[in-house]
Image (cartoon, rainbow, N blue to C red):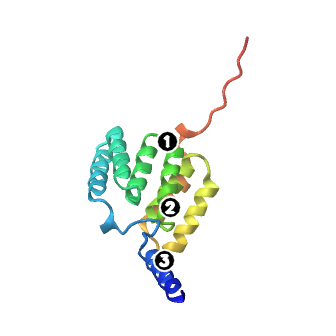
Amino acid sequence: MRLTSLLMTATVAVGVLASPVVGQQPDSQIAPRSVELVKIGEQQLAAGNFKAAEDALETALAADPRNRTAFVDAARVAQKQGLPGKAIRFTNKALQLEPNDLDAITVQGQAMVELGAVPRAKENLAKLQKLCPKGCTQLATLNAAITRGPAVASAKVPDSPKTN
């Protein structure tokens, strides 16, 4: 009886060790179709074809929902479309996969600035300062966005009072 219990325990332990780990897959293990679609999405984004970029990146995420780069690039597309809230949602998903993703932290901070959440963007800046003590392009990019502040177009203008 003890031998049976020991064998069952060993079997369970091996199963636990062999089970997949939740989170970002190593880049070499991301579905190749997803990687291809990210490249297409990046090309479309660079060409200013935001709808085509969005479609390619969403398809990349359907092909492999652990593709962190697809989430970050989708956030960039959302920013270009003037949708900072959507950009933040995409970066949140990337950061669930890898909390220290420099690009996700940067894009999220930029989107926060556009929403007027500068104190929260500064928290992202502080995180980047810890992750890049000698400096990095992401740190400079977010610092510039905070210094520049929200775009005028995203600033809320109160409605004028209606007269009857």
Q: Secondary structure at mark 1?
A: loop
- Looking at the rendered structure, which numbered label has been put on residue 95? 2
Q: Residue at x 48, y 73 (%)?
A: 132
Residue 18 visible to the viewer = yes
Q: Secondary structure at mark 3?
A: helix
Position of residue 76 in the picture relative to residue 111 (left or right)? left
CA distance for labels 3 and 1: 47 Å
Furthest toward the right, the residue is 164
Q: Name the residue at 43% across, 40% down.
A: 81
The residue at which mark 3 appears reads as 12
Task: Give me the residue at 52% from left, 68% from top.
Answer: 128
Badge 2 density bin: few <14, some 14–19, many ≥20, Cα 10 Å? many
Say what secondary structure mark 2 lies in. Answer: helix
Disc nearest the viewer among 2 and 1: 2
Name the spot of residue 86 as percent of width and height, x first.
50, 45
Residue 109 position within the rendered picture, expressed as x and y whole percent measured from the top left = 53, 56
